[in-house]
């Protein structure tokens, strides 16, 4: 349930023009296919350009974990390690690079992405 719910964080809670990726990439639990494990660990990543969006994602991850585990009579522990913030290029320097690329390769090749994904 949690993995499926995590996939809705970006689509239901974040402005569609705001770049955000939330992924569960590793699931670990149990010792046999026919025994329900006592504990399951999930590892994932959340990448955003905005600190506000990152805070929203963390809040939603916490709320989902709490709601799902409590409704099933379980418990959870959420550890979220914030990495380095996204690199946002300076307008002036980015324009210098764009102008140079346009001169070298042509305007149709050198394009500016306002909100890269």
Image (cartoon, grey):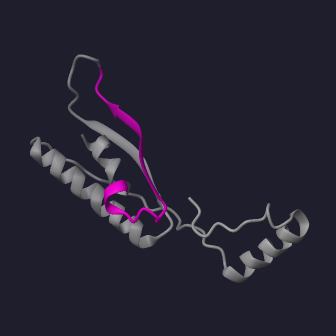
Whether 32 is drawn above or below 16: the answer is above
Horizontal and vertical percent position of residue 11 = 36, 55
Report if residue 72 is visible in the image.
yes
Quarter of the image that includes the N terminus: top left
Position of 86 with respect to 111 (left or right) is left
Residue at the far right in the pictured view: 104
Horizontal and vertical percent position of residue 107 = 81, 67
Residue drawn at point x = 42 percent, y = 47 percent: 23
Position of 55 with respect to 34 (left or right) is right
> Magenta segment: does it hold 12?
yes
> Magenta segment: does it hold 46?
no
Query: Which of these two is toward me, 66 or 50?
Result: 50
Residue drawn at point x = 32 percent, y = 61 percent: 13
Query: Which of these two is toward me, 42 or 57?
Result: 57
Residue drawn at point x = 59 percent, y = 62 percent: 116
Query: Which of these two is toward me, 29 or 9?
Result: 9
Position of 42 with respect to 35 (left or right) is right
Query: Which of these two is toward me, 79 or 11?
Result: 11
Whether 74 is drawn above or below 45: the answer is above
Whether 90 is drawn above or below 29: the answer is below
Residue at the far front in the pictured view: 108
The number of numbered badges drawn on the structure is 0
Horizontal and vertical percent position of residue 91 = 67, 80
Residue 117, quarter of the rendered image: bottom right
Horizontal and vertical percent position of residue 90 = 67, 79
Report if residue 79 is visible in the image.
no
Residue drawn at point x = 65 percent, y = 74 percent: 89
Residue bounds of the magenta highlight: 11-31
């Amino acid at each position: 349930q949690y993995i499926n719910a995590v996939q809705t964080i970006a689509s239901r809670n974040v402005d569609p023009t705001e770049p955000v990726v939330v992924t569960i990439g590793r699931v670990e639990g149990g010792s046999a296919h026919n025994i329900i494990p006592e504990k399951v660990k999930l590892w994932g990543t959340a990448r955003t350009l905005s600190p506000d969006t990152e805070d929203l994602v963390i809040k939603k991850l916490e709320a989902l974990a709490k709601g799902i585990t409590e409704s099933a009579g379980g418990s959870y522990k959420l550890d979220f390690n914030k990495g380095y913030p996204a690199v946002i290029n300076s307008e002036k320097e980015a324009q210098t690079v764009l102008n140079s690329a346009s001169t070298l390769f042509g305007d149709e090749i050198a394009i500016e992405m306002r909100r890269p994904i």
